[in-house]
Amino acid sequence: MQNVKTPLWYILHTYTSYESKVEKSLRNLIDNNGLQEQIFDIVVPEYEDIIEKEDGKRKVIQRKKFPGYVFIKMIYSDRLWYLVTQTNGVTGFVGPAGRPTPLTEAEIKRLGLEHREIVDLDFMPGELVKVVNGPLEGFTGTVESVSAERKKIKVIVSMFGRETPVELDFEQVERMAN
């Protein structure tokens, strides 16, 4: 496959229940190797499932929509293919002979991946933001840095009396009124 200059969505096959570990490892790979201009997004689609416990209480849990698969938006190159396939838990790309086959526009729409592009890019370092979803929902913090390419924002929040930097998606935060 020849090198492509446009970021496209690909599917990685992983060991079952390794999806989140693979996502974290790939994000570390991006940070450690300066790949922000080549890998743009990593998605492990999940959905909420409500289960009823024996005591009659209901509990909402997150389940993987596609167990054993991780979606990655990247500019394909042989070097990236090597780095990604060497990541612990990744068994290869979905495609003939383990070579990546990009998703079609119809597949991207059906999977809901096209909506991830619509974000507010106007966050500035030093700005006060509130976390609106995810495990840190309700926390407030100060923007430390913004990565428009990766659609990530690093926010300093106070947890357990300590200032802690956390990386969030743009969709997870909203600007606070002054």
Image: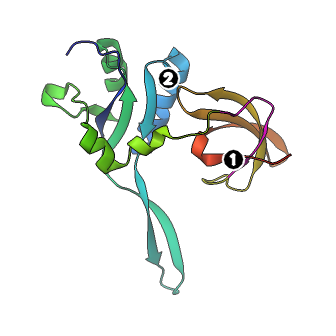
Q: Position of residue 40 (x, y in %)?
A: 46, 28
| Amino acid found under the numbered disc labelled 2 | Ile
Left or right for 99, reference 161: left
Residue at the spot of label 1: 174
Earlier residue among tags 2 and 1? 2
Rendered view: 115 above or below 28:
below
Residue at x-position 34% and y-position 12%: 79
Magenta-tinted stretch: 122-131
Q: Quadrant of the C terminus?
A: top right
Rendered view: 130 above or below 60:
above
Q: How packed is label 1: few (under 14 Cα within 10 Å), some, or many (20 or more)?
A: some
Q: Look at the numbered disc 1 and give the secondary structure of its residue.
A: strand
Decide which of 102, 60 is in the foreground and name it. 102
| Amino acid found under the numbered disc labelled 1 | Glu
Query: Cα distance, mark 2 to mark 1?
Result: 25 Å
Q: Quadrant of residue 95?
A: top left
Residue at x-position 75% and y-position 51%: 139
Decide which of 152, 167 is in the foreground and name it. 152
Q: Position of residue 130 (x, y in %)?
A: 73, 49
Give the overall secondary structure of the magenta segment.
loop
Q: Quadrant of residue 169?
A: top right
Residue at x-position 26% and y-position 44%: 107
**Disc number at residue 30?**
2
Decide which of 94, 90 is in the foreground and name it. 94
Residue 87 seen in the current view: no
Q: Position of residue 28 (x, y in %)?
A: 52, 27
Q: Look at the numbered disc 2 and give the secondary structure of its residue.
A: helix
Residue 151 seen in the current view: yes
Q: Nearer the viewer, mark 2 or mark 1?
A: 1
164 in the magenta segment: no
